[in-house]
């Protein structure tokens, strides 16, 4: 069945450009309008984010004209447009179904039930999800000891106190930053860790295969959970479960006005960072290829690589146990990057000002004694040089049984067109 679905998805994909070409042959003005629209949109978007006042206004106008050209192109042939939409939906739906079906695996997971689990709850996290989903009450009903994080208390100290009192499993109901802190204590004492996605974004929970819309569903891990071993990473010895960001994001979040006016703060900072004659961030590092990089405006280092291309799963990690740091580098117009010949085996990839790479460790240097970084969404200052290290299979998780299958499906979906090709050829 998956092979049939994959073939059908590839047929829809192949028909899509044919419909486009036929439509363009009927009206040669369409491809010209498409090129003009994309060019104006690109120029306008760049002026909007990189300039101020009058030039930003010009950018908005150019972007609007570009969008108008694109809309005109699409509406010139409505039957062709509807056919393309149907083919696109069909290709995506059939392809995802084929990938999901191919993810079925009967390999049993190791079940384990803690004898004295402790759940730490942050009642303020995620706008009060702990309270609205009655997580503490449900946990107590399952025999889980609940500790509430109150103002003035130290989260790590609470976790260590719980272990000192005999806890053989730690859980955290809160956001990603809190998850990392409690996970660090669990790693330190070699006990399993449970994630309850009661934060705002819960990226770690998403990549684990948990249901972020129903944070209380994660409580089943305490009574009917299975063990799963994943990686963690450290920045100067401090554990992070998602990512560490250098440069633009860290400086935006560090701004006092960010929490109340995110968009305006971002638009205020971007022109300074993207100006062609500036090198705003004093940080330097060597890629696995041997390339020395300076003048970058963004460096994102994640605990296992994110998906950075394709329409599906963008910004998610299909695996958490590859023993790798994922890197994304964006260099600005003023960047000076002396390079050495690239080695194909390094897995680094350049796309103009964008580079992706994987590594097991990375060192970021600076002439400053400290540098601002965002660790799992929280901006802090760390001493330089900054050492980032992957720790393969270092964190034992206790998760709901169904999350294993969800995570496996998402891993297959991340393969995209290449995975669909393999299924169609019978090689999945």
Image: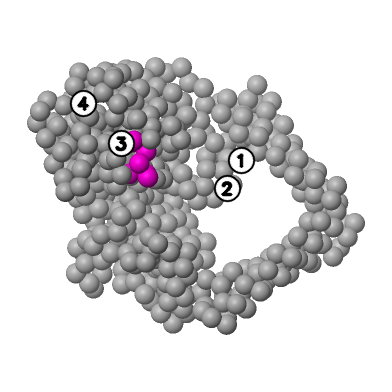
Give the main secondary structure of the magenta stretch: helix
Characterize the local packing of mark 4: few (<14), some (14-19) or many (20 or more) Cα atoms within 10 angstroms. Answer: some
Quarter of image, res 148: top left
Q: Residue at x 56, y 28 (%)?
A: 100
Residue of label 1: 417
Quarter of image, res 292: bottom left
Q: Give coordinates of residue 355: x percent, y percent.
A: 46, 60
Residue of label 3: 173
Cβ atoms under marks 3 and 1 closer than 8 Å: no
Q: Is residue 360 left or right of residue 417?
A: left
Considering only vertical position in the picture, is 68 above or below 108?
below
State how far apart marks 1 and 2 are (Cα). Answer: 9 Å
Q: Earlier in the sequence, mark 4 or mark 3?
A: 4
Callout 4 secondary element = strand
- Viewer-side label of 1, 2: 2
Q: Give coordinates of residue 297: x percent, y percent.
A: 40, 68
Callout 3 secondary element = strand
Q: Residue at x 38, y 60 (%)?
A: 259
- Viewer-side label of 3, 1: 3
164 inside magenta stretch? no
Q: Earlier in the sequence, mark 1 or mark 2?
A: 2
Q: Earlier in the sequence, mark 4 or mark 1?
A: 4
Q: Residue at x 59, y 47 (%)?
A: 311
Asked whether the viewer can see residue 353, the reply is yes
Characterize the local packing of mark 2: few (<14), some (14-19) or many (20 or more) Cα atoms within 10 angstroms. Answer: few
Residue of label 4: 145
Q: Give coordinates of residue 203: x percent, y percent.
A: 40, 43
């Amino acid at each position: 069945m998956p092979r049939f679905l994959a073939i059908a998805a590839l047929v829809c994909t192949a028909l899509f450009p044919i419909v486009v070409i036929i439509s363009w042959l009927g009206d040669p003005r369409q491809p010209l309008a498409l090129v003009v629209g994309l060019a104006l949109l690109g120029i306008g978007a760049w002026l909007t984010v990189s300039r101020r006042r009058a030039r930003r206004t010009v950018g908005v106008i150019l972007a609007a004209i570009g969008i108008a050209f694109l809309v005109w192109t699409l509406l010139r042939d409505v039957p062709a447009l509807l056919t393309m939409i149907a083919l696109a939906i069909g290709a995506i739906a059939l392809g995802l179904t084929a990938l999901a079906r191919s993810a079925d695996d009967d390999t049993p997971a190791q079940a384990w039930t803690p004898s004295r689990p402790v759940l730490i709850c942050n009642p303020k996290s995620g706008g009060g999800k702990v309270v609205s989903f009655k997580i503490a009450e449900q946990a107590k009903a399952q025999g889980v000891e609940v500790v509430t994080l109150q103002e003035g208390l130290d989260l790590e100290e609470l976790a260590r106190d719980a272990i000192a009192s005999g806890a053989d499993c730690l859980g955290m109901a809160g956001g990603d930053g809190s998850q990392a802190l409690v996970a660090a204590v669990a790693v330190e004492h070699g006990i399993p860790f449970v994630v309850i996605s009661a934060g705002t974004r819960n990226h770690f929970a998403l990549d684990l295969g948990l249901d972020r819309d129903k944070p209380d569903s994660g409580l089943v891990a305490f009574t009917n959970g299975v063990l799963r071993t994943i990686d963690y990473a450290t920045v100067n010895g401090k554990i992070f479960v998602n990512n560490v960001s250098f440069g633009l994001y860290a400086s935006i979040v560090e701004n006092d006005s960010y929490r109340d006016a995110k968009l305006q703060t971002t638009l205020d900072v971007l022109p300074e960072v993207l100006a062609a004659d500036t090198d705003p961030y004093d940080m330097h590092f060597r890629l696995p290829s041997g390339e020395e990089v300076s003048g970058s405006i963004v460096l994102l280092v994640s605990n296992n690589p994110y998906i950075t291309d394709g329409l599906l799963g963008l910004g998610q990690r299909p695996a958490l146990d590859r023993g790798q740091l994922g890197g994304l580098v964006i260099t600005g117009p003023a960047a000076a990057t002396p390079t050495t010949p690239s080695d194909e085996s390094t897995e680094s990839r350049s796309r103009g000002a964008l580079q992706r790479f994987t590594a097991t460790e990375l060192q970021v240097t600076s002439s400053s004694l400290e540098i601002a970084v965002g660790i799992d969404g929280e901006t802090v200052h760390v001493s330089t040089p900054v050492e980032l290290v992957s720790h393969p299979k270092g964190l034992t998780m206790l998760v709901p049984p169904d999350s294993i299958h969800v995570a496996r499906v998402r891993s297959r979906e991340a393969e995209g067109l290449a995975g669909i090709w393999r299924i169609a050829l019978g090689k999945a």
